[in-house]
Structure formats: structure tokens, C-alpha cells
Amino acid sequence: MTADPLTARLPWLSELEALPARSPREAARVATYFVSIRSRRLPDHDTTVWPP
């Protein structure tokens, strides 16, 4: 059996399915938090307004 080239380079990839998933209730709770996150990454040289 030939190994999948991606799995050969990233052996942990086949284990992703075993990670726990968030319940719909947990997902709704963290969605509010994720929306509140703002990027403070430095702007590109052509950015005219900073901060956003």
C-alpha cells in the first residue's frame, strides 16, 4: 500500500479526526469572542488610514 504523500510529510494529519469538536453551544459562545478580535498587524505601505 502506497502512503498518501501529504500524510507522509505530515504524519499527524491522520490524527486530526480524533481531536474533540466543539458542541453547537460552545461554538456559539466562542463565536462572539472571535468576532471581537481585531488585528493589530502593521499596515502595508499603501494603507492610508490606520488604525482601522
Image (cartoon, rainbow, N blue to C red):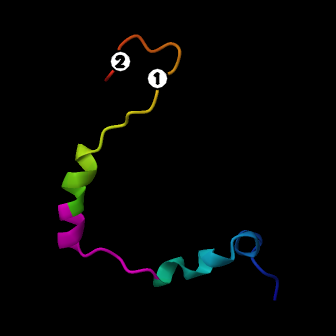
Q: Residue at the right extreme?
A: 2
Q: Is residue 46 left or right of residue 37?
A: right
Residue that label 2 marks: 50
Is residue 10 placed above or below 45 in the rendered structure? Answer: below
First of labels 2, 1 by sequence position: 1
Seen at 19% across and 53% down, the residue is 32
Q: Is residue 32 left or right of residue 17?
A: left
Please state which of residues 27 and 1 is positioned toward the viewer in this rendering.
27
The amino acid type found where label 1 is placed reads: Pro
Per the rendering, the mark at residue 7 is none
Q: What residue span does the magenta drawing correspond to?
A: 19-29
Residue that label 1 marks: 43
Q: Residues within 10 Å of mark 1 (few under 14, many from 20)?
A: few
Seen at 23% across and 45% down, the residue is 36
Is 9 magenta? The answer is: no
Could you say where residue 16 lies in the image, as x and y percent from the top left? 52, 77
